[in-house]
Image (spheres, grey):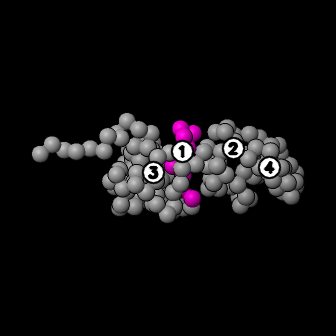
Amino acid sequence: MPKTTHGKTKTSEYTAWEGLIQRCTNKSHKYYQSYGGRGITVCGRWANFENFYKDMGAKPDKQHTIERVNNDKGYSKNNCVWATQIAQARNRRTRTDNTSGTPGIYWEKRTRKWQVQICAATKRISLGCYKHFADAISAREKGELTYW
């Protein structure tokens, strides 16, 4: 009996599915440490592409990629959406070297000031450096309004 296929192996949805499987399971993948290496898993249902596609459906457009709503949880129907890069920039986990507890704000020892950054349209933008933490937070909030 011939093997039937879903006919979607050349689609961007299949590429997204294959990428998340690799990031979470392949220890040789360049991003494994940030995904599978820190406990991010793929639900058993999504081991099969057809189930992934039934749950997620087609991407709204080519600007959208798979996004985990809670970055500390795995890939599953209840934790994933198709999102733009701009939306994803808002949903990044705080860097491990961030001592401020606020995304995009960190203490720079060399200058002895708070550095403020924001990611927008896949670019990191500097919003300046500030002597006082409250000023840094204010700059970050203004940056979010401007860029997001």
Between marks 3 and 1, how big is the CA–CA gap?
9 Å
Amino acid at pointer 4: Leu
The residue shown at (37%, 36%) is 10
- The front one of 50 and 98 is 50
Q: Which residues are magenta?
A: 61-69
First along the sequence among labels 3 and 4: 3
Report if residue 16 lies within the magenta region. Answer: no
- The front one of 70 and 63 is 63
Left or right: residue 106 compared with residue 139: left
> For the residue labelled by badge 2, is the local secondary structure a helix, a strand or a loop?
strand
Amino acid at pointer 1: Pro
Between marks 3 and 4, how big is the CA–CA gap?
31 Å
Question: Which quadrant, please, contains the N terminus?
Answer: top left
Question: Residue 47 occupies which quadrant of the picture?
Answer: bottom left
Residue at the spot of label 1: 60
Residue 145 is marked as 4
> For the residue labelled by badge 3, is the local secondary structure a helix, a strand or a loop?
loop
Between marks 1 and 4, how big is the CA–CA gap?
25 Å
Residue 119 is marked as 2
The residue shown at (41%, 38%) is 11
> Which is in the foreground here, disc 2 or disc 1?
1
First along the sequence among labels 2 and 1: 1
